[in-house]
Amino acid sequence: MSPNTANSARKSIAIIGLGSIGGIVAGLLRATDRHDVVACVRHRIATLTVERSEGPVEVPITALTDPEQAEPVDWVLLCTKAQDTSASAGWLQRLCGANTRVASLQNGIGHAQRVRPFVGQAAVVPTIVYYNGERLAPDRVRYRRTGEHDFAVADDADGRAFAGLLEGTSLVTSVTPDFKTLAWRKLLLNAAANPISALTIQRNHVFRRDDIRDLCHALLEETMRVARADGAELPADEIEQAMGRLLSVPSDAGSSMYFDRLAGRPLEIDAITGAVVAAGERHGIATPLNRMLLTLARAAREVKIEE
């Protein structure tokens, strides 16, 4: 899509969190020099490198380490894990004004409900992130494209403005009239890939096992029943499509929950598997497989494992 007058102007952008998702979008936005980009982080860095198949991008980065240093901006890209949203409240309060848009680059569903209590009058823009990212160091991330596009947003003024914001980067944004279906389609895949890779402590090669594929198939069937009850328009061959997408990811890639398990960080299990279980409860649909993985992941998430 071509930029209009509103989204082609230079914007101020604050990115909260430079992990596997935030580091990639920060580096690629900064490389275009179309906007003023600042990173909100715990520890200051001077440069940021994004490794890509077509060659690395290395850019200087302006980093803030204290919310008191922040001022209102045009855009906030919230790239923390869902469970860390409330911990970002100090940043959000300083960065958000009446005309600010806050894009939630987080897993799960219910982005707006999760973020809105912390942003005052700012608009919340839910996004679906598709690319595979890996944080290699505080100032280095690895980007892998896993499909035809990197983001999906709703086909409304805020969604189109987000798509315009990323123009000039290599990140591709899809604008869709049915955001709910795409959000559940992504959650469907995450509900299988994330807990299994985290609990087995294996990268994507684990999904090449016949028994794991069978488990994924059963999980997808269970989750799809919940998604349809919640209003997602998923086709009859959705499970086969989901398995194809899962197996198309390189075997040496890893899910975000896998990397969190290795590092001993809290797992995003409540925003992913927990969201499926909660939706199942709302609609009266049993979710025994998801509930089992939720219980196991909650028990395992505090244990630090060395790869």
Image (spheres, rainbow, N blue to C red):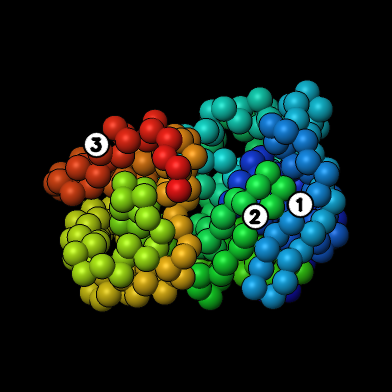
Under circle 3, the secondary element is: helix
User: Closer to the camera: disc 2 or disc 3?
Assistant: 2
240 displayed left or right of 127: left
Say whether residue 102 is visible.
Answer: no
Quadrant of the rendered structure where residue 88 is? Answer: top right
Question: Compared to 188, does 99 lie above or below?
Answer: above
Q: What's the residue at 53%, 75% (across, down)?
A: 148
Nearer to us in this view, 178 or 195:
195
Q: What's the residue at 69%, 52% (across, down)?
A: 140
- Which of the numbered marks, if any, corresponds to residue 141? 2
- Which of the numbered marks, if any, corresponds to residue 295? 3
Task: Give the x, y percent position of residue 129.
Answer: 53, 58
Q: Amino acid at mark 2?
A: Val
Q: Which residue is mark 1?
A: 48
Task: Give the x, y percent position of residue 127.
Answer: 54, 54
Q: Amino acid at mark 3?
A: Thr
Circles 1 and 2: CB distance less than 8 Å? yes
Question: Compared to 193, does 3 lie above or below?
Answer: below
How far apart marks 2 and 3 lie (CA) works out to 31 Å
Q: What's the residue at 74%, 56% (across, down)?
A: 49
Which comes before the other along the chain, label 1 or label 2? 1
